[in-house]
Image: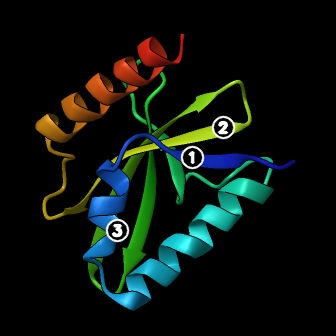
Amino acid sequence: MSRTIIFYEDYFIEFYQVLDQKVKGKIQFVFELIKQVDRVPEKFLKHLAGTNGLYEIRIEYQSNIYRIFCCFDNEKLVVLFNGFQKKTQKTPHKEIEKAERLMKDYFKNKK
């Protein structure tokens, strides 16, 4: 199994650039896992209930929690949208809405 990870526009890059080096390392580790492991544990990649194919990549470092939204395209491709640091139990609704909008744009612009 080998997946390719691509970024949709600059949303993820802008989020990633300001992170601590150790957090970036943890994100790279999880990306490698997603690229190579057939069934990625839910601890790292989880489908968001109530969405149309939206997933969140889950990163924990020390007491901080980070989320990066993505979706699959033809089984192999993981498209990365917005990311954020989670400060509450529930994922902020506006972050989910933003990711859903970006996912729609991605598939629309792909055609």
Spatial distance from mark 3 to mark 2, Cα to Cα? Answer: 19 Å
Is residue 103 visible in the rendered image? The answer is: yes
Residue plotted at (27% across, 23% down): 101
Q: How many other residues sit within 10 Å of disc 3, few (<14), some (14-19) or many (≥20)?
A: some
Residues at discs 1 and 2 in contact (Cβ within 8 Å):
yes
Residues at discs 3 and 2 in contact (Cβ within 8 Å):
no
Residue marked by disc 2: 77
- Type of the residue with mark 2: Leu
Whole-percent x and y of residue 37? 78, 56
User: Which element carries disc 2, helix, strand or loop?
Assistant: strand
Q: Relative to residue 11, is residue 77 drawn left or right?
A: right
Residue marked by disc 3: 16
Q: Relative to residue 3, is residue 5 drawn left or right?
A: left
User: Which element carries disc 1, helix, strand or loop?
Assistant: strand
Whole-percent x and y of residue 60? 39, 73
Q: How many other residues sit within 10 Å of disc 1, few (<14), some (14-19) or many (≥20)?
A: few
Q: Relative to residue 70, is residue 83 drawn left or right?
A: left
Whether 2 is drawn above or below 70: the answer is: below
Whole-percent x and y of residue 56? 42, 46
Whether 109 is drawn above or below 103: the answer is: above
- Type of the residue with mark 3: Tyr
User: Which element carries disc 3, helix, strand or loop?
Assistant: helix
> Residue 6, which numbered label?
1
Q: How many other residues sit within 10 Å of disc 2, few (<14), some (14-19) or many (≥20)?
A: some
Q: Nearer the viewer, residue 60 or 108?
A: 108
Mark 3 vs mark 1: which is more N-terminal? Answer: 1
Spatial distance from mark 3 to mark 1, Cα to Cα? Answer: 14 Å
- Type of the residue with mark 1: Ile
User: Residue furthest toward the right?
Assistant: 1
Whole-percent x and y of residue 24? 44, 79
Residue plotted at (12% across, 36% down): 94
